Image (spheres, rainbow, N blue to C red):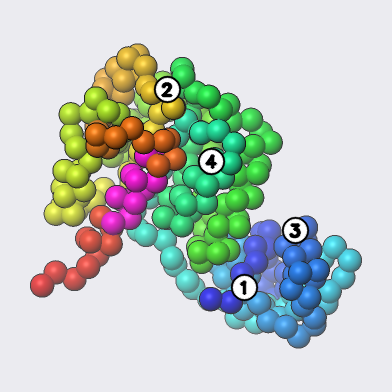
């Protein structure tokens, strides 16, 4: 796949302008010149073949040659609600979530959370979403939602009727059984996974989940890090989608 660049919407039917980090990378690292062709996308689902029209200080003018309909989404809307881990592990979690097709990531505020989702950190993570989307070919940016307290999020999602799974060592159902069930029955159109902090869920948080119809699932005999647990669930969803879409003999 050719190099891809994110162009901030709105995008004119025939022209676009790259600015900021994208323009700097193209001009200073890739050394593009007028006439070179690249791929640009707007994060809302559109992708274009574009030709560099002019390289100017701080921006690159583009001529849009062809709009392409490239839908690389997986067909099931997956939301990951996660009590974010510390430092660089946040970036890794976001990057891999984008690659696995997660549609929305919700930073959770929990009783035992160790990393509070502040504005600067969220801005950096949204930039990671752009970089990961450029690499993996997604044309829709994964949303990083505003941080939400667990109790409020838990209740609000229940009202929407999404299928809800809470990862917890005390869960009565095994993750393997969950995957087998999804592979043999039609998936819900939307899935919501919740992963707690490194210190685990409190009894009050578990009670809130149970009272709002969340399915509590064990991820196996080993204790997983937050980002590992979250990506295991995202992988299960992706695997189930692939398995369901495979032609049956």
Residue at image mark 4? 89
Q: Are marks 4 and 1 in contact (CB under 8 Å)?
A: no
- Mark linked to residue 3: 1
What residue lies at 55% left-to-right and 57% top-to-bottom? 132
Residue 175, picture quadrant: top left
Asked if the residues shown at circle 3 and circle 1 are in contact, with their CB atoms under 8 angstroms apart, the answer is no
Which of the two marks, 1 or 2, is nearer to us in this view?
Answer: 2
Which tag is nearer the camera, tag 3 or tag 2? 2
Gap in angstroms between the C-alphas marked 2 and 4? 16 Å
Label whose residue precedes the other's in the sequence (3 or 2): 3
The answer to whether mark 1 and mark 2 are in CB contact below 8 A is no
Left or right of 184 on screen, residue 109: right
Residue labelled with disc 2 = 199
Region in magenta = 229-239
* In this view, 23 is above or below 160: below
Secondary structure, mark 2, is loop
Mark positioned earlier in the residue sequence (4 or 3): 3
Q: Residues within 10 Å of mark 4 (few under 14, many from 20)?
A: some
The x and y percentages for residue 215 are 24, 32
Q: Percent position (x, y) of residue 184?
A: 14, 54
Q: Going by the picture, which residue comes out furthest to the front?
A: 222
Residue at 40 percent across and 42 percent down: it is 228
Q: CA distance from mark 3 to mark 2?
A: 37 Å
Residue with the mark numbered 3: 21
Residue 232: say if magenta: yes
């Amino acid at each position: 796949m050719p190099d891809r660049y994110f162009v901030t919407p709105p995008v004119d039917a025939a022209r676009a302008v790259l600015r900021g980090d994208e323009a700097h990378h193209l001009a200073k690292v890739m050394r593009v010149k007028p006439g070179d062709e690249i791929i640009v996308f707007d994060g809302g689902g559109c992708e274009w073949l574009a030709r560099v029209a002019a390289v100017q200080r701080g921006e690159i003018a583009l001529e849009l040659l062809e709009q392409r309909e490239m839908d690389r989404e997986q067909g099931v809307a997956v939301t990951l609600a996660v009590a974010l881990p510390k430092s660089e592990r946040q970036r890794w979690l976001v990057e891999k979530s984008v690659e696995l097709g997660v549609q929305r990531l919700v930073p959770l505020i929990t009783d035992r959370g160790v990393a509070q989702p502040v504005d600067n950190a969220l801005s950096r993570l949204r930039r990671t979403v752009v970089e990961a989307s450029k690499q993996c070919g997604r044309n829709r940016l994964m949303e990083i939602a505003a941080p939400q307290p667990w109790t409020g999020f838990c209740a609000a999602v229940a009202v929407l009727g999404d299928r809800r799974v809470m990862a917890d060592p005390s869960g009565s159902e095994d993750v393997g059984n969950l995957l087998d069930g999804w592979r043999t029955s039609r998936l819900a159109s939307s899935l919501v996974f919740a992963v707690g902090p490194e210190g685990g869920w409190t009894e009050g948080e578990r009670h809130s989940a149970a009272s709002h119809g969340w399915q509590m699932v064990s991820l196996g005999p080993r204790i997983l890090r937050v980002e590992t647990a979250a990506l295991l669930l995202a992988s299960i969803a992706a695997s189930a989608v692939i398995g369901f879409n495979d032609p049956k003999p």
